[in-house]
Image (cartoon, rainbow, N blue to C red):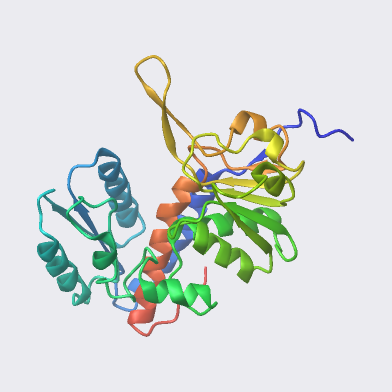
Amino acid sequence: MTTENVMSTVIDGKAFAAKVRSRIAAQVAEIKKQGVTPGLAVVLVGEDPASQVYVRNKGKQTIEAGMQSFEHKLDASTSQADLMALVDQLNNDDSVHGILVQLPLPDHIDEEVVLNSINFDKDVDGFHLTNVGRLSIGAEGIVPCTPLGSIMMLKDHLGDLSGLNAVVVGRSNIVGKPMAALLLQENCTVTIAHSRTKDLPEVCKAADIVIAAVGRPEMVKGDWIKPGATVIDVGINRLDSGDGKTRLVGDVDYAGASSVAGAITPVPGGVGPMTIACLLHNTMQQCCRLNGLEIPQA
């Protein structure tokens, strides 16, 4: 049987995220019966257009899930001290169960200091050093949203991941490293590859699962993919389409990879929608933990 020109199964992140959000809405309805409403606070500093879109979508989906949405929009000139004062206020607000400070922040603000000033039990992005450490040793904590969404889609598509070879292309603290930790928890054999990896195409070609999270448009080519492998494309890159407009592409050459892979996520419509769904998931779970409630089954 030849694998040439066989189109992959498209892993529809938009549809899967809708199912996740529906489940969360049902769980939130159960939580509210106990007199508690999960609340998510999002802080946006400055006027970054992409960040504004993300924050607007997060607020809309938070409300649709039955949660409270608290949006704080600050001027780009806001001082680090004023931002941290707001974070401290949210840390001490019992109606807020999740806090997200939208990245990137203006250059005069130290992102690491701000992120680690968030109460780690309300750090629904999973970026606080305490949550990073918990994930690295396999302890219970808050998992970053994009890797969490990616592992949920992998398990939904493949079932048991035990024994599979997984290659993560990219070693960022936000995606690459936590993704590798999650795959290890699922008993995969994991390789973290990056720009200095020797024979990167051959490394990818040995993988049953390829996670592309390197931030370079269409870097992972079709002939890097083992026939039948599952490809999760985390990248979101804007390219000039030549007519004065831009188009979104991932870190994977979709046209080439989709004729070889067994399954692949598209860009857009793949991992992206799952990121916000997992943000709601984390907020719902932390609301239960902070209030001593059982997480409702759904």
- Residue 29 seen from this side: no
Vertical relation: 121 (above or below) 213: below
Q: Say which residue appears at 65% left-offset and 68% top-offset.
A: 186
Give the x, y percent position of residue 149.
Answer: 51, 56
Tell whether 95 sits left or right of 121: left
Q: Nearer the viewer, residue 162 or 11?
A: 162
Q: Position of residue 118 (x, y in %)?
A: 26, 71
Of the 4 image quadrants, the one containing the N terminus is top right
The residue positioned 72% from the left and 52% from the top of the image is: 208
User: Observer-nearest residue: 146 or 134?
Assistant: 134
Q: Quadrant of residue 253?
A: top right
The single residue placed furthest to the right in the displayed view is: 1
The answer to whether any part of residue 110 appears in the image is yes
Residue 191 position, x and y percent, is: 64, 58
Relative vertical location of residue 1 with respect to residue 174 in this rendering, above or below? above
| Image side of residue 203 versus residue 217, left or right | right
Furthest toward the top, the residue is 243
* Position in image of residue 97 (x %, y %): 29, 71
Above or below, comparing residue 288 to residue 76 in the picture: below
Frontmost residue, 289 versus 120: 120
Q: Residue at x 67, y 52 (%)?
A: 209
Count the numbered circles shown.
0
Q: Residue at x 22, y 74 (%)?
A: 91
